[in-house]
Amino acid sequence: MKERTKQKIDTFFKINDDLLFMKDNIMKACSIILDTYNNGGKILVCGNGGSCSDSEHIVGELMKGFLLKRPLDEDIKYKFKQYFGDEGSIIANKLQGSLPAISLGVHAAFNTAFINDVDSSLIYAQQVIGYGKKDDSIIGISTSGNAANVYYAFMAAKVKGLKCIALCGMDGGKISAISDCSLVAPSHETYRIQEYHVAIYHLICAVVESEIFEF
């Protein structure tokens, strides 16, 4: 692990010492996601309500620079220049390294069609069947740990061979019970659980970014 990554982790747990009890699990989640990307996989993310917004937030931190600039590799920059001249160079210098991630709650046409035609509780499971590959992972967010559509998404993920990371609260619920890594915020109040979730996934995104990118 890079020294700067260790410093980020140490600083986080000094500020958030009430989360020290779950440090090992948070590091396990980071390891799962790093393995996913190092093996050429992608991350799927899902949740409902505020947790759906958190899903989009996570994708935003992964798909573009979070704490680092992430300049493109020189070979990619060269190809932009080779194919498109000076305009290509300008574009390449603005683009950033990206970690592939998909929020399953944003596909309105598909989701409403499946809700109308099939079963509203299976909208995420259907997307896992469509998108999921063996080297992928899924993050499921549910403050109660019992959201049916997230639970069924994890079922589909298990069948497809994905790793499952649960972000929950309360007692972790049934989603945590079938996850590979469970991160249960220490609260029974929804808004507090969500606040913990933001802090936790920001650390995870920072660690993953720091380990994969140089700048």
Image (cartoon, rainbow, N blue to C red):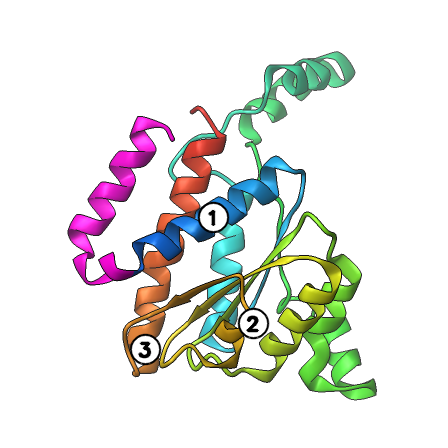
Dividing the picture into quadrants, the one containing residue 21 is bottom left
Q: Quadrant of the C terminus?
A: top left
Query: Contact, CB < 8 Å: mark 3 with mark 1?
Result: no
188 and 163: which one is in front?
A: 163
**Label 2 vs 1, first from the N-terminus:** 1
Label 3 – label 1 distance at C-alpha: 21 Å
Residue 129: x and y in percent read 77, 65
- Examine the rendered structure and indicate whether residue 144 appears above or below residue 159: below
Q: Residue at x 47, y 79 (%)?
A: 145
- Examine the rendered structure and indicate whether residue 124 appears above or below residue 212: below
Q: Which residue is mark 3?
A: 191
Q: Is residue 17 magenta?
A: yes
Task: Confirm whether residue 66 shows in the render.
Answer: no
Seen in the image, is 168 located left or right of residue 136?
left
**Label 3 vs 2, first from the N-terminus:** 2
Residue 61 disc label: 1
Amino acid of disc 2: Ile
Q: Residue at x 37, y 65 (%)?
A: 197
Question: In the displayed image of the protein, which residue is found farthest to the right?
Answer: 117
Amino acid of disc 1: Glu
| Span highlighted in magenta in the image | 1-21
Q: Secondary structure at mark 2?
A: loop
Amino acid of disc 3: Tyr
Q: Secondary structure at mark 1?
A: helix
Label 2 – label 1 distance at C-alpha: 26 Å
Task: Confirm whether residue 29 shows in the render.
Answer: yes
Seen in the image, is 5 located left or right of residue 166?
left
Q: Quadrant of the N terminus?
A: top left
Give the class, few, some or many, for how many residues have Cα within 10 Å of label 2's Cα (few <14, many ≥20): some
Give the class, few, some or many, for how many residues have Cα within 10 Å of label 3's Cα (few <14, many ≥20): few
Seen in the image, is 20 located left or right of residue 206?
left
Q: Which residue is mark 2?
A: 178
